[in-house]
Amino acid sequence: MNEHGKKSWWERTESLDTQWMSKSLCVEIGPDLFFIEQGGAYTEAKQICQMCSVTSECLTWALAQPGIGGFLGGTTEHQRRRMGRQAS
């Protein structure tokens, strides 16, 4: 927990099933394509996610991480925030 008594994103994910991560295509590539500077394009990340067999699991995981950036589960952080607002 941080100094405000809140769990870090990593602590929040400990209870989630993450075995799917070893099957993801991005695990072989590394994070640079998926966590880019603001204003950058996720063109290559989108292509990789479209070919990945665990995109839905990744999206479920990403939605459970409010505020986590990057291109995850075939979505940007902005798209995931919008999904979260629509779900509530």
Image: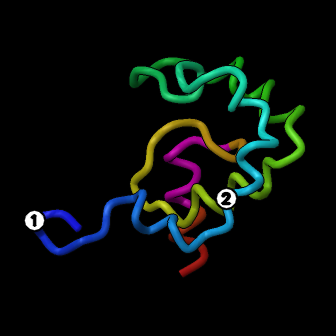
For residue 24, above or below residue 83: above
Q: Which residue is mark 2?
A: 18
Disc 2 is placed on an element classified as loop
The residue closer to the viewer here, 44 or 23, is 23
Q: Badge 2: few (under 14), some or many (20 or more) residues near its Cα, within 10 Å? A: few
The picture places residue 45, in percent across and down from the top left corner, at 69, 25
Which residues, given as a range, are shown in magenta?
75-82
- Quarter residue 24 falls in: top right
Q: Label 1 sits on what residue type?
A: Glu
Q: Report the front residue among 72 and 78.
A: 72
Q: Amino acid at mark 2?
A: Thr
Give the residue at x 51% y 64%. 13
Residue beneath label 1, please?
3
Task: Tell me residue 74's x, y (percent).
Answer: 72, 42
Q: Of all residues shown, which one is farthest toward the left?
A: 3
- Judged by its main secondary structure, the magenta piece is helix
